[in-house]
Image (cartoon, helix red, strand yellow):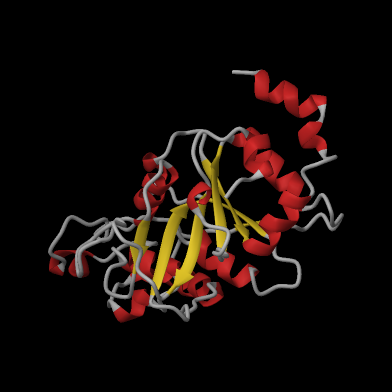
Amino acid sequence: MKSKLVDALRLDSSPVAVILTDTKPEGALQFKEGRWGCVASTMLAVAKGRTAVFDRETFGCPGGGTGLGFGDQYRQCGLAIDALLSTGDAEIAAQMQRSTRMGEGERFFKTPELVRTWLGSVPISDVPTEFVVLEPLEQVSAEDEPALVIFLVNADQLSALAVMSDYARGSGESVIARFGGACQSILFGYAEAQRDEPRGIMGFFDIAQRSRVSRETLSFTAPWALFREMEANVAGSFLEMEDWRELQGRQ
């Protein structure tokens, strides 16, 4: 799929298309059933040209399964996420079979109660398809319609996407930034896609996963309708003007 927006941004890697489907792509990366894996790391591999597929048995970790839209995998997998994201639980940590931060907690929230409050605001969903596929946008065929498009970008490119998201609206409210796992902007994107005017989601704020990307990299997740809106408005926008060209020329 050719994109004017991608060309204007001069990205170093392909945007990642999130596709909901009942058809499993051949040769795609996939975690082994019941084995741990990181959806965010796989997303980086997709941005470099691979295709990945996930289902309800191969989502890697409870946060990833929840982020991909396979229901509340924290609850289904029995993970004490309220302890993990806050002050930890030494007893639970001792029972776990692999290396974990559970003992001291990740301290992203002050108390377990606040984690439960946050979790109540998360738009947990169960996608209607068997598979969630991540594919480089440039490899998406004209017949496919992704649910979301995820950009991995630097600060200048993120700024451009934030401005572009409101270019044809003038609302000043076309972007949100929410706490969640590095892959969970996917879940927030599903919720945004249900709005009349879906917003873009700035992400990859997960401190536990930031080491997987460069210091300059964040994500911007666009529901398909927003991506198409931005794509249609590249011509005549600031992306063709001198201010943007000057930014592209700096180191």
Query: 226 or 180: nearer the eye?
Result: 226
The answer to whether one can see residue 175 in this image is no
Place residue 183 in its image quadrant: bottom left
The answer to whether one can see residue 58 in this image is yes
Quadrant (top left/top right/bottom left/bottom right) for the C terminus: top right
Q: Residue at x 28, y 56 (%)?
A: 27
Q: Residue at x 70, y 59 (%)?
A: 226
Measured from the top left, where is residue 150 in percent x and y?
54, 52
Measured from the top left, where is residue 198 in percent x and y?
70, 65
Measured from the top left, where is residue 158 in percent x and y?
63, 41
Q: Is residue 250 left or right of residue 229?
A: left
Query: 156 or 80: nearer the eye?
Result: 156
Query: 200 or 115: nearer the eye?
Result: 200
Query: 121 or 182: nearer the eye?
Result: 182
Q: Residue at x 57, y 65 (%)?
A: 145
Measured from the top left, where is residue 204 in percent x and y?
49, 49
Q: Residue at x 37, y 48 (%)?
A: 50
- Image height of 119 relative to 43, above or below: below
**How many numbered marks are there?**
0
Q: Is residue 245 left or right of residue 201?
A: right
Q: Is residue 84 left or right of residue 137?
A: left
